[in-house]
Image (cartoon, rainbow, N blue to C red):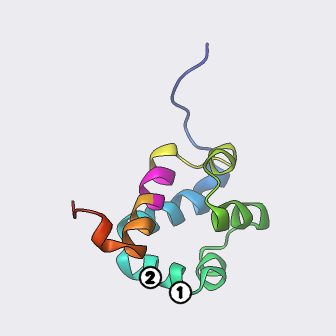
Amino acid sequence: MNAHYFFPPADAYPLNRTLFRLKSEPAYRRRFMADRDAAMTEAGLAADVRAALVTFDRDRLVALGAHPYLVFMADLRLAMERAPAAFEEF
C-alpha cells in the first residue's frame, strides 16, 4: 500500500526542527538569512541536509525526510522576509 502521507524518520528531526523554526521563529529566520552556515551549525545539520537547505531543493529535502508542509512554509516565510511588501501578512 502506498500512503500519500509518510511519517518523517527520526533521524530527520534536526532538519524538520530547523524548518519549523524557519517557519515559526522570526529571530531564527533572520539569523539564518544573515549567516546560514552558523544557523545550520547551531541546528546540528549533516552536510547533505545543509547542501539541500542552502538551495531549498524541495524534492531533495523531502527525500532526506523533511515534511513537505514544513518545506513549503519555511520557504514561504523566507520569501516573505526577503520581500515583505510582496506578501500580505497572515
Up the image or down, 73 lies above or below 65; here it is: below
Q: Extreme front residue here?
A: 86
Where does label 1 land, which residue?
Answer: 34
Within 10 Å of disc 1 (Cα), the crowding (few <14, some 14-19, many 20+) is few
Q: Amino acid at mark 1?
A: Ala
| Among the 4 quarters of the image, the one containing residue 48 | bottom right
- Of residues 86 and 15, the one nearer the viewer is 86
The image's mark for residue 4 is none
| Among the 4 quarters of the image, the one containing residue 56 | bottom right
Magenta region: which residues? 70-75
Q: Amino acid at mark 2?
A: Arg
- Of residues 68 and 76, the one nearer the viewer is 76
Measured as percent of width and height from the top left, residue 58 is found at 60, 49
Do callouts 2 and 1 mark residues in contact (Cβ within 8 Å)? yes
Whole-angstrom CA distance, mark 2 to mark 1, is 6 Å
Label 2: element kind: helix
Predominant SS along the magenta part:
helix
Up the image or down, 74 lies above or below 36; here it is: above
Q: Is residue 33 left or right of residue 84?
A: right
Task: Identify the residue shown where x is 28% and y is 72%.
Answer: 85
The quadrant of the picture occupied by the N terminus is top right
Where does label 2 land, which residue?
Answer: 30
Task: Identify the residue shown where x is 32% and y is 73%.
Answer: 84
6 within the magenta span: no
Task: Identify the residue shown where x is 39% and y is 74%.
Answer: 81
| Among the 4 quarters of the image, the one containing residue 2 | top right
